[in-house]
Amino acid sequence: MPLEILFSDFFQRALAGGILIGITAPLIGIFLVLRRLSMIGDTIAHVTIAGVALGFLIEVYPLGVGLVFAILASFAIEKLRKAYKSYAELSIAIIMSGGVALASLFFTLGMGYNTDVMSYLFGSIYTLDLMDLYVVGGVTVVVVLVVSLFFKEFFLLSFEEDAASVSGLPVKLLNMLITILTALVVSTAIKIVGALLVSALLTIPVAISLLLARSFKASVVWSVIIAEIAVVIGLVVAGIWNLAPGATIVLLLIAMLVMTLLGKKGRSI
């Protein structure tokens, strides 16, 4: 029976992992969107895939190696962003190119595991094991804790970086914190929605919340709620009808965005 899958152990692990990422992705995504760095998720995801490929090649926990690569990429992005202040998007393009190149290189060195790596490109949430859940859970705790502690600082930094600097805030440290948190979230999310779709989970819930909310705090809350709705419903639908879970979640988010836009347009008429 299709409904039996909802009570299986692997589905319960997938649901737990999805719910955790549904908290962290929009929580970080809102600061990225406001800082016009929406594409940083794609960049770090590509670098993470290179780390995952290397992990398979050297037979070390792939998600762990991918996480290390993601953090190193976050440092590199921040360094380049400071070097090219007037061309901040250049740092994203450079690091993405390097990530794709490394991933391609590792693909050719380990042809035998390419199928395993591909699961990280498109997501394989049903293969989450307890170690993956511990990693995702640990990242969730770190992200929620850091965002809670520096919420006001991140808020000011997102809207006016120069004003934050003048007011005496440690702008370099805060920028680095946001970038590292992004790396942690992206590297753990790729096994859930896939590297090619992870940016959607960072940005689309935020895009919807900005249409609905009347304050910054409300937009944060709404983005998390929207992400959780999409993750839970998307996983259930994908499980029952044997669909790709990552793609189902993202398409559901896009449908929610379209309905929100139509609703806003209808009320304005």
Image (cartoon, helix red, strand yellow):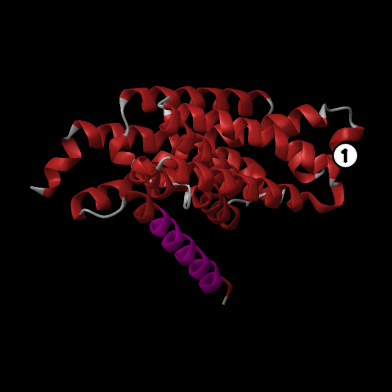
Residue farthest toward the front in the current orientation of the protein: 109
Q: Is residue 193 left or right of residue 161?
A: left
Q: For the stretch drawn in magenta, what is the main secondary structure?
A: helix
Kindly identify the residue that appears in the image at 47 percent across and 52 percent down.
Answer: 197
Residue farthest toward the right in the current orientation of the protein: 166
* Residue 265 located within the stretch drawn in magenta: yes
Residue farthest toward the bottom in the current orientation of the protein: 269
Residue 248 in the image, given as x and y percentages of width and height: 34, 55
Kindly identify the residue that appears in the image at 69 percent across and 29 percent down.
Answer: 177
Residue 224 in the image, given as x and y percentages of width and height: 49, 41
Kindly identify the residue that appears in the image at 54 percent across and 67 percent down.
Answer: 264
Q: Is residue 149 left or right of residue 249?
A: right
Disc 1 secondary structure class: helix
Residue 6 in the image, given as x and y percentages of width and height: 19, 40
Tag 1: Cα neighbours inside 10 Å, few (<14), some, or many (≥20)?
few
* Residue 221 located within the stretch drawn in magenta: no
Residue farthest toward the left in the current orientation of the protein: 1
The residue range painted magenta reads 250-267
Residue 89 in the image, given as x and y percentages of width and height: 74, 52
Position of the C terminus, as image quadrant, is bottom right
Q: Is residue 155 visible?
A: no
- The amino acid pointed to by label 1 is Ala
Q: Quadrant of residue 149?
A: top right
Front-lying residue, 136 or 124: 124
Q: Is residue 268 above or below residue 237?
A: below
Q: Quadrant of residue 142?
A: top right
Front-lying residue, 6 or 43: 43
Residue designated by label 1: 163
Q: Is residue 112 left or right of residue 104?
A: left
